[in-house]
Each structure stands twice: as structure tokens, then as C-alpha cells.
Amino acid sequence: NTNSPRSGKSLDPDTLNKMVYLHAALCEALRLYAPIPFERKSPIKQDVLPSGHKVDANWKILFSVYALGRMKAVWGEDA
């Protein structure tokens, strides 16, 4: 349990789950300031992306988490 800064009372998990604005603020902060700059993924089998690009099973895919959080096509003009 964590303590509320104003009342000093303990906050239980159910109360924290109801704090939707706190959750949204934390998610937005992680989107803009990700704790890691890059992520690496490996496909488990050969696949074709929706764009038509083929991905082999032995490829290592590296992408920028920072750039993903700022894509205007996804997040809008104020990304």
C-alpha cells in the first residue's frame, strides 16, 4: 500500500485503479519519455507486414521507442 500525500491514509489497489487521470498521466509521461531509447524484437516465424514487406524469422528488428511516441500520424499534430 502507498500513502496519500494529503491525508496520510493508505491507498489500496482498488482506489489506485479508479484514478483514471493518474493512469493517463503516467501513460502519457512514458510515451513521451520512455525509459529505454530503443527496443529489439525477433520474429518467431517468417511473416509479411501489412505494408507488404517480408520479414524473415532470423531477422533482428530494432526500433526507436522515442520516435514511436512522437509519430504525428498516430498521436496527432501535438505529438
Image (cartoon, helix red, strand yellow):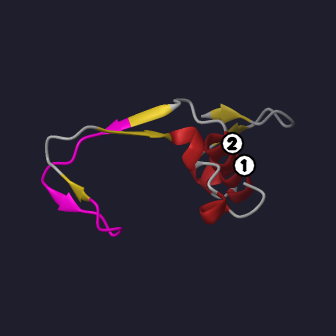
Which amino acid type is marked by label 2?
A: Ala
The residue depicted at 18 percent of the width and 60 percent of the height is 47
When asked about the image quadrant of residue 19, the answer is: bottom right
What element does badge 1 sit on? helix
The residue depicted at 14 percent of the width and 55 percent of the height is 46
Q: CA distance from mark 1 to mark 2?
A: 6 Å
Q: Which residues are magenta?
A: 40-53
How far across and how far down the image is residue 78, in percent? 78, 57
What element does badge 2 sit on? helix
Residue situated in front as seen by the camera: 12 or 45: 45
For label 1, the crowd category at 10 Å Cα-Cα, with few meaning under 14, some 14 to 19 and many 20 or more, is few
Nearest-to-viewer mark from 1 and 2: 2
The residue depicted at 14 percent of the width and 41 percent of the height is 58
Q: Are marks 1 and 2 in contact (CB under 8 Å)?
A: yes
Check the picture and name the quadrant holding the C terminus: bottom right
Q: Is residue 63 magenta?
A: no
Q: Is residue 42 above or below residue 74?
A: above
Q: Judge left or right: residue 15 versus residue 46.
A: right
Residue extending furthest toward the right: 6
The residue depicted at 52 percent of the width and 41 percent of the height is 65
Please tell me whether the stretch drawn in magenta is mainly helix, strand or loop: loop
Check the picture and name the quadrant holding the N terminus: top right
How far across and how far down the image is residue 26, in percent? 67, 44
Q: Which residue is mark 2?
A: 29
How far across and how far down the image is residue 8, in percent? 79, 32
Residue 25 is tagged as 1
